[in-house]
Amino acid sequence: MNAQTGRIVVGYDGSEPAGAAVDWAAAQAQRRGLPLVVVAAVDYVGMLPGIYGPSSWPDLFQEEAEQIAANGVARARKTADSIDVTAEGRVGQVTQVLVQMGRPADQLVVGTRGRGELAGSLLGSVAFAVTAHAHCPVVVVHGNSRPPGPDRPVLVGVDDSKGAGSALQYAADLAAADGATLIVATSFRPVSPLTWVEAGYYSAEATGTPKFNDRARDAAHSVTASAARTALARHPELDVQELVLSGPADRELVTAAGDCGLLVVGTRGHGGFAGLLLGSVSHGVIRSSPCPVVVVPSQPADA
């Protein structure tokens, strides 16, 4: 796997979904022998010192952030007892803090939902923003969070965009590290005969059906075959399977991910015949995936 700094960073706000993220991150850090940083951010926007409130508020919020982070560390150490686990409490806007802390990291891990109160984390609402702006792969933990393995494949959504290429590389590395099958999947959108009629593609004498759907399906198979070759060139020992789906990519990937340990997508993609549109797909799968989702940026962390 392409290392960033050899550490995993996880956001924690005291909520149970954030706790699940800590559990997942701790297990991954333990398995890979990486240090873990538990980050808690307290946002006191609108609660300014001076005439707007007690001058001690910033210090109190810093103490609150440090205590939340310390609680997260205590939880992580129940799973990870042989690695370095540290707490980082920050006062600031949650998304900015997490993106900043994740810049030099292998992974940034968040939950799907959080809570407000003093922590102000609301991890559910910031998950989309974090995945859009982070400089490292972001793991959104929800659903069945058993890790990948021989019976828990890694599913990666691909098209032929740069974003999908980064996701494929990362997914192949994860699958190889965990001894999991890698499933490379793409989706195309079939067009109904009625649409062709309305678009004027049929004349009164026309018979048969337009060939566009056949071309789209063939292009999708070409995309998955190319992705499989790329993954095998990187990890010849991998068990790689190809999957062509028909329908909206986010819906089809979520359905295909039912027995998977991870679903990996890129931050951006494009249409063409494959029609994967990874940028919008990443949001769809984050909302509905039955397993943790990894969103991989198309640019390296130092770009």
Image (tube, rainbow, N blue to C red):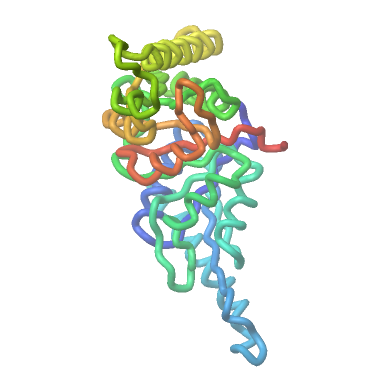
- Observer-nearest residue: 100 or 285? 285
- Observer-nearest residue: 170 or 56? 170
Q: Quadrant of the C terminus?
A: top right
Residue at image point 38% right, 56% down: 113
Q: Is residue 259 left or right of residue 234?
A: left
Residue at image point 55% right, 12% down: 234
- The location of residue 238, given as percent across then percent down, is 44, 12
Which residue lies most toward the bottom here?
51
Which residue lies most toward the front here?
204
Which residue lies most toward the right here?
303
Q: Is residue 232 left or right of residue 259?
A: right
Residue at image point 48% right, 63% down: 121
- The location of residue 24, given as percent across then percent down, is 40, 42
- Position of residue 15 relative to residue 218, above or below, is below
- Observer-nearest residue: 30 or 147? 147
Residue 179 in view, yes or no: no
- The location of residue 166, given as percent across then percent down, is 57, 26
Residue at image point 56% right, 57% down: 95
- Position of residue 91 relative to residue 233, above or below, is below
- Position of residue 152 relative to residue 76, above or below, is above
Rendered image quadrant of residue 245 = top left
